[in-house]
Amino acid sequence: MRKSRHDIHPHVVCLLILSVALAAGLRADDALHRVWAVKDCRIVTPGGPVLEKAVIVIRDGLIEAVGAGIAVPPDAEVIDAANLTAYPGLIDGLGKSLLKLPEEKFDMTKVYSGDYNDKDRGITPDLRAFDYVSLGKSVFEKYYKYGFTAAQVMPDRGILTGRSSFFCLSDPDKNKSLLLRDVCLGIGFSPPGLMAYPSSLMGLTAYLKQILQDSVFYDAGRDRWNKDMRGIARPDYNPVLEVLSDHVAGRKPVIFLCRNQNDIRRALALVAGSRLDAVICDLGNEASDVIPELKKAKARVLVTVAFKAPPSNLYSQKGKAEREKAEKEVYPKNPARLAEAGIPFAFSSLDTDDPKTFIEGILKAIDAGLPQDKALAALTAAPASFFGLDRTLGTIEPGKIANIVLAEGDLLVKDAKVRYAFADGKRFELKEAKVKEGEKPTVSVSGKWELAAEGVPKLTVDFVQEETALSGKMVTPFGVFDFTGGSVSANQVDFEMTISVGGQEINLYISGTVEGDTMRGTIVQDTEGSVEFTAKRIPG
Amino acid sequence: MKRHMKTAIALFWAMELLLLTGLAADKPLLLKNGNIITVSGGTIEGGDVLVQAGKIVRVGKDLGAPGVETIDLKGQWVMPGIIDSHSHIAVEGDVNEMGDLITSEADVRDVINPRDMMIFYALTGGVTTVHTMQGSANPIAGRGVVLKLRWGKSADELIFQGAPLTSKWALGENPKQSNMGGAGKARYPKTRMGVEAAIRKEFEQAKDYMRQWQEYEKKLKASRAGKGKVPAPLPPKRDYRLEGIADILSGKLWVRCHAYQSEEMLSIMRLCKEYGVKLACFEHALEGYRITNELVANGVGISTFVDFWAYKWEAYNTMPHGAALAAKRGVLVALNSDDPERMRHLFNDAAKTVRFGGLSEAEAIKTLTINPAKILGVDKKVGTIEPGKDADMAVFSRHPLDPYTVCQMTIIDGTVYFDRAKYLEDRKKAEEEKKKEAEAKAPKDKKTGAEV
Amino acid sequence: MKKRILLISIALAVSAARLPGQEAGSSYFIKNATIFPVIGERIPNGGLLIENGKIKTLGRDLQAPAGAQVIDGTGMFVYPGFIDAFTHFGLSEIGAIPSTVDLREMGKENPEVKTAWAINPFSVHFGTGRVNGTTAALVAPSGGTFPGISALVKMDGWSLPEMAVNEAATSLINFPMTPRPPKEGVSVQKESGDDVTSKIVDKIKDYLNEARRYLQLKKLAAENPAVAAPASNPKYEALAPVLDGTLPVIISVEKAKDIELAIKFIKEQKLKAIFRGCVQGFKVADKIKQSGIPVIIDSLYQGPSEPEDGYDAPYRNVAELAKAGVTICFSSGDDPAFGKDLTYHAAKAVAFGLDRDEAVRALTINPAKVFGVENRLGSLEPGKDADLFLAAGDPLDARTEVKLIFINGRPIDMSNWWEKQYEKWKNRPTK
């Protein structure tokens, strides 16, 4: 099916020069490239038959025509797609890698004064993904390479995490790429870890119940005031409740970020009897354990694909071997089981850091039994329909936005090769990357990382990596300490350092494994013991 | 035996079997040939227990019948499943909501984790029912719940149906945060008297809240009667915290108050009486032995340790004889664990009350069974081995108070949830498989093929 | 009943008689008890004579000499006093109140710090900890890598020096523990934890080598005036007897891999070692046996080190070590408030397969040998200290009351913090 990539077409040569020109900073005039005809391609679109030797006509950002015997318009630029397959551009149902949130500097004196604000407590429904999204050509390329042309982006920290926006990955100017603004409200189950209320999962659940109720009450008060100002006291303005208004009334969706099946259960309990239009983001890959409840609630599910054992799971409590077995054999089956039970779901990249690991996870799910066509639907028609975009995205049909990817052969397979991507009708060509073999480190950790571990104050580490050598400095509440002599091997990081506290020397031994922008591992302190840590790369 | 007697007996059994199988889909189960500590009616040596549809049907001798699935206890000891009335297992996340003082809106049912390995460990110690709840960081912490340790079932299936819900209170060093060494925000209260003041304040606020709703109902009625001339009133804002308090004041929740020192317990008993609150027991109550008269007069039990002490100041003026002395003076005493490791050796703790304070063995067993059942309001269903009660039992290799006893089997609702013999068998098989795998992987000498 | 009256009157008489002046010439004769000497067979209907703080004689058909106070042991069982092989008695009163706690000094290296300087002989926990027959205990410091020097003390006495059997019983080294791999999240590609353990062990070796260098220089300087003596360093001085093997060192270690590493370390460094903990010892029992290192079993109020070991791992661990021939001792653990539960741990081990006689040895003669005091403690033999007790039943049974305890040949005051409260509050009138 897949032709050798060594077939070089004259078009490719021209385009190479063009893209070099682009890279050199010259802006191409988009107005000259508004009409395209993709000829002789195979079209795979969910919910429709596979078309062979078809033509797709794109004009002014939209799909104008699709079919076998369609004529090529005279003003169209033609792409010979004889050995290419066209797919609807994939949609990342929910992610955050396009977000660049500001570095958080936490004021330690608050621990003693107790002066926490809403932000400290994780109550930030007014945090808008739109304000912090970071788009750009190099970012887009990472997405196009794996077939993605649209994404929903949402902050995911805290309890009321913020609001999402949907973007077409077409223009570095976010105003031009925006599809839907401030659409879903994120609700999380991880208290920020301070002693502010709520500080426990139990308190958080009760808090959510109360705040949702408060919002209903707030709405009723405000409506009443607006209708007839006589006879009642003017209600106070409350920015948090104001934001919740639309969501509590069911006008806009909420996305529950469920770390495990217990969170799903909690989420469904909050939804029952309310007007919430809820989507469940299954971060723990345990949705298939609560299928009857999901069916009853007619829930839509966002499925993640890192397939790591979630908090409070049983396998981890039985030992390392059990956990690893489950991560290999049980969790990857989650999407297949949901598909079999007929639970509507879309894929989310929220727990994978980049499109590469996202697709790898999806392929794992396919290996574990998810049919290809269901996987494709979960990346196209499903996310479009969940968020009200089904009339404009998700399939290759006339009238819809021209978000299309052309691949050499199948898309959802290992080492798939996307040659072209169309986003908002703008075409992008992907070049073959030079693969460097034989270099030991597969990650670069240079830069700032924020490290969190239970019982340890938040630390910042600034790494300087030169090939396998690692050095840098660590910022702690007790001062800044340098270290050298660390190493990076494949994606494993190891270093030691000595901290001085009150004249006492403490030796720390840190080993971690890096995946994308996350590092996880252990810190050993002399002979006192060890603690697990998670570190996130600080963008910028 | 005369022939017609034999026939009569056979007929009786056939009818009983028919009756039994007709009662429910569940097949009957017979535990035979054990020493049955019934708690309600003494110990039956060489006795049998017949179980069906999750309930105990008969207790006695020679209950055998053909065709009934039988477990031969071979002289081992059976007691009612141990009930631990103070635990924090199967809870996801922090059991303390540290962010605020009174958190009566918090409900432990929202955070039940049925996959907590500690449930399994408790089963290995003969525990069948636990009361799980918040910690003691708050004067009023929220609602607690009674669970049966049906390992492998969902969170909803763990809940002990029909058990009263509880309200967890705490007095003393923990809510006033004395032992946090300065960390944590400066939070009121910092004294024991401040703790009681905080509780009273919240009670009064809850009463105000209930009054607001009553007034709203009145106004609503008036507005409907006035046919639109008077605008309809807005209902008061719902406050789940104050509703949690209202449940306490209405007696819906059984209050369990964590307290150590006697003066605090006396003043809380007065407070509860004043407000008509159902105070079921004090948790820990390590000075409870000093106020047994008052505890008995107020009908308040204690759920306590036998010998965990001296870890903080308020746990100093105590003795292991405390539980036994209080029991002998008429207080309802339950022994608890507050810790998953202690939970699995509660039966060893009970043995200590025989030595310290001279409790009889039968009374010592009660502190693990019928006493906590009464404190939790589930004594009609569990706590003894009697016909009609739930088939919750623990089988031990020797008498449960014997130092060398080992829990062999734990049964809930007639289902075996822990079987040590099977556990050991499975472990042996797993070890053998591991060995085979390791041998298969071991590098072999190229020439001889033997393992290097 | 007759024997009870006798005992009470004796108890009253002896408690009144418990004055320092009574040292010389105190003799007691226990008659008609079942005696467990530990060395040798049990003696039914036996007699035991205590004179001047020592066991004079024991056996069947003995008569009480004139002047000896007679104690009727009918129905009673006599055992040598139990030795708790690792405790913090006297170093901590109430855990949450820092002013009452002297467990650990700041810093990692404190090999010269002696608990004998800090043990509070009037700690409430001595009185409550001995009620099940514990008559001697090793009191150790904690924390850091080199916590200090432990003392072996009797559970009763007028002052610390009088209580001490050995003010410098052992040194200690806390071995690093290989961390568990993270529970959730990224799967670790290699067991980098092992490398960290080795790195820390290397640091410990470096420290010991520094001490050796110091001692060598000191020796040279003493012999050769041309060699400058090093500046005095009490920490390295304190390590001198550890390095030449005259002072045993307790090494706390738990996991199988770490135990193997520790055995290598001990052999290399030529230390006279005692293990403490070894909760995964059953996985390398043969290696421990071969090394000849005895093991102090920590409190069995714990779960398995790794869930794969099984829920009963800490319990069956003891039996398996004993089966492999390892010398074991028992300890009541880190909390002095639970001192009396030394016998609980022994009984639990027996429940899960340990031979009961071995359990009793592990409470008596084994720790005596391990701490080099078997000439004085650990069994009922003529010439040994009269540290023993009379129990109304099996002393490993929590239901058994220990009626009388002798330390240094004197019956001790059995009242303690608990008993005082019990005596008072059981008399409050019921309304």
Image (cartoon, rainbow, N blue to C red):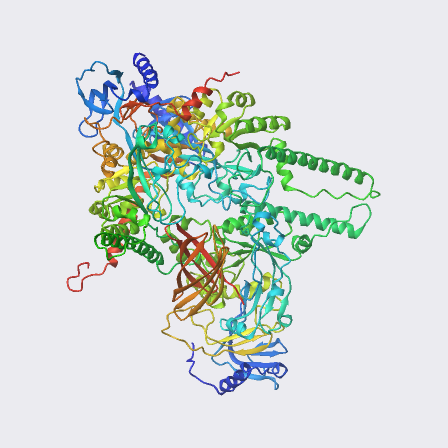
From this viewpoint, which residue is outermost toward the right? B229
Q: Position of residue A500 (x, y in %)?
A: 44, 55
**Left or right of residue A134, residue B54 in this image:** left
Q: In this view, does B291 lie above or below A209?
A: above
Give the image location of residue C397, x and y in percent: 32, 28
From this viewpoint, which residue is outermost toward the top? C2
**B371 w.r.t. A283: above or below:** above
Locate residue A453 relative to residue C259 in the image: left or right: right
The foreground one among A424 and C413 is C413
Q: Residue at x 45, y 77 (%)?
A: A433
- Image quarter where the N terminus of chain C lies is top left
Q: Which is more toward the observer, C6 or A192? A: C6
How many numbered circles are shown? 0
In the current view of this chain or complex, which residue is farthest to the left? B448
Can the viewer see residue B211 in this picture?
yes
Front one among A422 and B443: B443
**Residue A52 position within the rendered picture, expressed as x and y whole percent measured from the top left:** 50, 77
Residue A191 or A325: which is nearer the viewer? A191
Q: In this view, does A431 lie above or below B287?
A: below
Where is residue A534 shown, x and y percent of the image?
46, 57
Residue A496 falls in image quadrant: bottom left
Residue B413 seen in the figure: no
